[in-house]
Image (spheres, grey):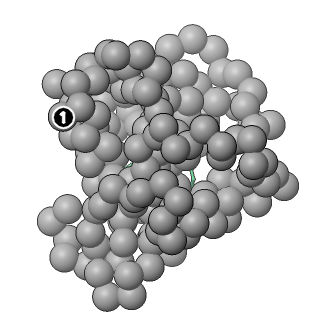
Amino acid sequence: MDDARYRLEQISFSSPAYQEMIALREKILRTPLGLHFTPNELAHENQDIHLGVFHTVSHQLIACCVLTQINAETIKLRQMAVDQPFQRQHIGSALLRFAEDIALEKGYRLMILHARLHAVAFYEKHGYQAIGEPFLEVTIPHMYMQKKLS
Ligand SMILES: CC(C)(COP(=O)(O)OP(=O)(O)OC[C@H]1O[C@@H](n2cnc3c(N)ncnc32)[C@H](O)[C@@H]1OP(=O)(O)O)[C@@H](O)C(=O)NCCC(=O)NCCS
């Protein structure tokens, strides 16, 4: 990321940073919906790639996302969250590009995701295409989106 105030990093499962990531995901993605993570949901995350954006001075985690393999060609972006005071400052964009670079490096050719309706425009700005009709997930409408990585 060009902005020296922030650094992009991969986060190890079960590290303190992973616990910080769960707290940020809960705060941004679940609590507003009156939902919480269940241990079962998180149990499979040891197979996933966890990515974070940290504030260089405070070392606070300010954004994160998860990549889950679907098959040898396809990987799914999940749990994209930027902490509220840092939204709309292109931090989500930098994290998305970082996730795409890592996916490409690991040999994946297609990124898929389930976008909350309000975030569809964000992903479209990054070349993602919405396919099909909205569907409900975690109680709110989502769109299936995908992008060929190159
Ligand atoms: C959606 C989210 C990940 C975007 O990250 P961000 O850092 O706020 O977005 P950026 O600043 O990188 O935005 C990039 C572009 O997308 C636009 N954009 C961002 N969020 C948008 C939204 N909700 N609706 C429409 N456009 C949006 C920005 O205006 C910006 O446009 P520009 O390049 O013309 O200036 C972040 O706002 C977030 O975590 N929101 C709450 C949780 C959430 O909805 N996560 C997504 C679940 S699918």
Q: At which x and y percent is residue 54?
A: 36, 72
**Residue at point 32%, 16% (across, down):** 73
Residue 28: tell me if it is visible: no
**Residue at point 38%, 32% (across, down):** 124
Depth check: 65 or 42 in front? Answer: 42
Depth check: 91 or 44 in front? Answer: 44
**Residue at point 44%, 79% (across, down):** 60
What's under tag 1, amino acid-wise?
Glu
Q: At which x and y percent is residue 41?
A: 70, 41
Q: Quick one: label 1, few (<14), some, or many (20+) residues within 10 Å?
A: few
Q: At which x and y percent is residue 15?
A: 48, 65
Q: Does residue 86 appear left or right of residue 10 in this picture? A: right
What is the residue that sits farthest to the top in this orientation? 132
Residue 68: tell me if it is visible: yes
What is the residue that sits farthest to the bottom in this orientation? 57
Q: Does residue 128 appear left or right of residue 34 in this picture? A: left
Indicate yes or no: mark 1 CB to ligand 1 under 8 Å.
Answer: no
* As drawn, 69 above or below 65: above
* As drawn, 104 above or below 57: above
Q: Which quarter of the picture shows residue 57?
A: bottom left
**Which quadrant of the figure contains the C terminus?**
top left
**Residue at point 78%, 48% (across, down):** 38
Q: At which x and y percent is residue 33?
A: 79, 52
Residue denoted by label 1: 105
Q: How many marks?
A: 1
